[in-house]
Image: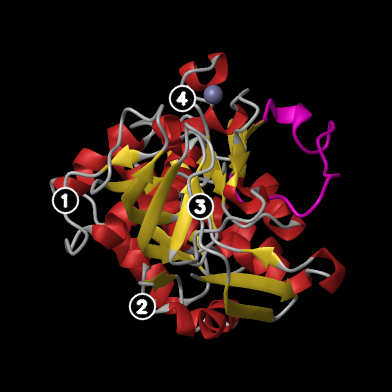
Amino acid sequence: MRATLMYGAGDVRVENLPDSAVKLPTDALVRITASCICGSDLWPYASMKPEDGPARMGHEFIGIVEDTGSEVTTVKPGDLVVAPFAISDNTCEFCREGLHTSCAHAQANFWDTEPEEGCQAEAVRVPLADGTLVKLPVTADSALIPSLLTLSDVLGTGHHAAVAGGVDERTRVTVIGDGAVGLLAVLSAKRLGAEQIILMGRHHARTGLGREFGATDVVSARGEEGIAAVRDLTGGHGTHVVLEAVGNMPAYEQALGVVRPGGVISRVGVPQYEEAPIGFGSLFRHNIRLAGGPAPVRAYIEELMPDILDGRIEPGKVFDTTTDLDGVPAGYQDMADRRSLKVLIRP
Ligand SMILES: [Zn+2]
C-alpha cells in the first residue's frame, strides 16, 4: 500500500510499504477514503532532523472498515468511520471523564507517535477500534465528508479551546491565529453563544472565512499594535477568553496582552516552548488562568456531529485544496507557504 513518510524538514515522500493488517483482537483495518494535512504537521516539516526519520505521517481520517479483530464489537466491515487524532479505549477512568487524550490504556497513543501507522495513506491499522472509531451515518461519497473529517481534529480542537476557556453567552473572545484551528475556534465560540469574537489574523481570505464562521471583528496588526486594537474594541479591558491556536511565544505574549482581568487563556496550538511568563507581572496580578491542551476530540464527536448532519455548521469550508496521495508532498509545501489553508487528501 502507499503511505506518506517524512524523511526530514521539507522532505515528504509517498512510498510503497507493506500492507497494514489486523494484528490484535481489538484492532480494525480501515481503508482510508479521506484524510488531510494538519497545521501541526508543519512543525516537523520545518524542523525535523533526518536522524529522526523517516516518520509515518497523518492523524486525521475517514475510511471504510475492511477487517476487524475477534473482540471488536462496535464496527464491522463495510462501516464508514471517523477516527480522532488519538487512540483511546473510551472506557478507562480518564476517558469516562472526557479526557481521552490521557487514556490510561497501554495501547492508547497519538497517531503521530504510533509506530508503522499513519493516516496519510491508503489504509491504517486502528488499535482499540471499539474505543477509537465512530461510525458515520453517511456514505463515503457524501458531500458532508469534508465537514465530518474535521471531527478528527480541527473542529474538536477549536471546540475544546472554547470549552476549556469557558466560552458562553456572556463572554467576549479573542482568537489568535487564522489557521484551520483558529477559524474553527471562531465557529465554536459562535456556536457556544459568545457575544463578541475578535479574530487576530492577517491573511485576508482566511479572516473572511472567519467572519463567515462568526467573527465580529478582525485585527490584522500584531504585537503592541494588535494588543492596542483589541483593547480599543473591548472598552480597554481585553476579552474574558483568549483562544490561542498558534503555539509560539509571540502568540502567548499576544494572549497575555489581550486577556481581561479574571480571564482565561486557552491554548490549543502546540506550544513550541517550555518556559513562559506566569508570574506577578503576567498571570498572577489579575487572576488570569491558563487552560487548554491536546483536545480529547473523541469526547466531542457525538455532540458536534448532529450540527454537521443538519447543516447548522459547515467546518469543512477550511479545506481549500483537494489532492490524491501523489499531491501530498506539494500539499505540505503549499500549506507551509500559506498558499493552501488545509489540504484534503482522497487516497
Ligand atoms: Zn481510556
For the residues carrying marks 2 and 3, which lies nearer the camera in this image?
A: 2
Image point (33%, 55%), residue name: 63
Disc nearer the start of the sequence (1/3): 1
**Residue at 43%, 30% in the rendered image:** 131
Element at badge 2?
strand
Q: Indicate which label's residue lies in the foreground, 1 or 3.
A: 1
Q: Earlier in the sequence, mark 4 or mark 2?
A: 4
How far separated are the C-alphas under marks 2 and 3? Answer: 26 Å
Q: Residues within 10 Å of mark 3 (few under 14, many from 20)?
A: many
Three-letter code for the amino acid on which mark 3 is drawn: Val
Q: Amino acid at mark 2?
A: Thr
Q: Please, what secondary structure does the residue beneath circle 4 have?
A: loop
The answer to whether residue 196 of the structure is visible from this angle is no
Write down the residue under mark 3.
175
Q: Are marks 1 and 3 in contact (CB under 8 Å)?
A: no
Labels 4 and 3 touching (C-beta < 8 A): no
Query: Distance of mark 4 from mark 2, alpha carbons?
Result: 32 Å
- Three-letter amino acid code at the position of disc 1: Val
According to the picture, the residue beneath numbered tag 1 turns out to be: 138
- Amino acid type, label 4: Asn
Question: What residue did someone put label 4 on?
Answer: 90
